[in-house]
Image (tube, grey):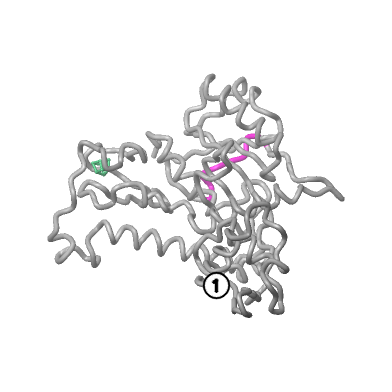
Amino acid sequence: MTPDAEFGYELLVCRYAELAWHPSEGSRPALVARQLGTKDRRWDTVVIEVDPAAFERRREFGDRTIDSDLLHVIRGAPAEWAFYRDALPHPGYPWRYVRQAVHRAAGRDLIEKRRDGNRIEIRRKRPYPDWVERIVAVENKPDLNRSAADRLADQLDHDVETALADEAWLATETTGERVEPALLRELPVEAGILATDFSASVDADAGSVAWHATDLAPGEGERRDPETETLRLEIAERAYGKGWRSFHETMRPDCRHFELRREGRGLVPYCAAKEKIPTARECSGSCPDFSPEPPQWRTKGWPVEGGPGKGFKRVLARRRERERDRVESVE
Ligand code: SF4
C-alpha cells in the first residue's frame, strides 16, 4: 500500500525497522520507538540497538520507563547500605527531590530503602546494566519534495552536529522509482537514506539503502560528555517504556470506526469512516466522525473481552511484549 499520511508511513517504517534493523550492516537486536528526542529535537523513529545480555538484565527492572530522577538514584545506589546523600552524586537541584525519587524507586522495587533514625539509607537490588549500544534517529518523509528536503537538511544537520545519535537516516517512499538525486544532494552526506517501497507489503525487504549513514559516535579514545550520555540513556528508557505501538494512547480505538489493519507483517490503524489511515491529530476526541463503540460490544458478542477498543490495546501490548522477548533472544 501507499501510505496516505505521514503518520501511517511512520508506523510502517517503525515496523520495517523492527523486522530489518540494521538495513546495511545485517541483523542487530534493536528496540524501535517513535516521536522521541529532546526539547530541541524530536525524532520520528528512534532505533535503540541493544546488548542482548544487558537488555535481559534491564528487563528485571520491569516494563516501565525509568525516568531521569529514578535513573539518578538507581545508577548511584550502592551495593552496601548508605545514607542516600552520601551515596549519590550531587543532583544539581535540591536534595528533597532526590528523597522523593528514593521513595518512588523503592515503591517500584527498583532499590531497597530503610530508616536509620531520621536518615534514609539505600541499597541497590541489582546493578543497572549498560544495555544501550547505539541510538539511531530516523526522519520519515514519504513524499520528498524540495521544501521537505530543505527542512530535513536543517534537522539532519542538527543531528550530525550534536551527535546525540550514532546515526541519522531519512526514510522516504519510492514505490519502485529512484529517489530524486537532486533532492538527496541537499541533505548532509553523513545522513543515510533509506528508500522504502511499502506498495506490496511491509517486510524486511521493503527497504533498500540509497546512501549509507556515517557513524557519528565519538572516535577511538574520545567519549561523549556525561550529560549527553545521560540524555541518551533517558531517550533509550523512554523508548523502552513506550515503544511505537502506543498510538492507541492518543488515538480513539474506542471509536466504532477504528480498525487495526494488517499491512504485510505490520498492524496499522485504519478509520472506516474516513477510509484511510487517520493521523493522530484527526483521530482524537475532537474528530467530528467519532462515534463511541456501542456498550453491547463491551459486554457481549465481540470476541475479545472488554470490546474492540480494549481488545486493540491488548493486541498492541502483546505485540510489544513479543518484540521485547525477540530482542532479548537475538545474539
Ligand atoms: S471516525 Fe475519527 S475518531 Fe473514529 S476512528 Fe475515524 S478518525 Fe478516529
At x 70% / y 37%, what residue is drawn? 162
Q: Is residue 205 magenta?
A: yes
Quadrant containing the C terminus in the rendered view: bottom right
Residue 28: quarter of image: bottom right
- Position in image of residue 260 (x %, y %): 32, 51
- Secondary structure type for disc 1: helix
In-front residue for pair 171/197 = 171
Image side of residue 263 versus residue 241, left or right: left
Amino acid of disc 1: Ala
Q: Main secondary structure of the magenta part?
A: strand
Image position, residue 294 (x, y; %): 14, 54
Q: Quadrant of residue 155?
A: top right
Instruction: Report if residue 112 lies within the magenta region.
Output: no
Residue 289: image quadrant is top left
Is residue 149 shown above or below 251? above
Identify the residue shown where x is 71% and y is 40%.
Answer: 163
Q: Nearer the viewer, residue 151 or 77?
A: 77
Instruction: Look at 63% across and 50% down and name the residue there.
Output: 22
Task: Tell me where the magenta segment starts and ends, as one range.
Answer: 204-211
* Residue topped by disc 1: 106
Give the left or right position of residue 223, taking residue 209 as reference. Answer: right
Q: Quadrant of the N terminus?
A: top left
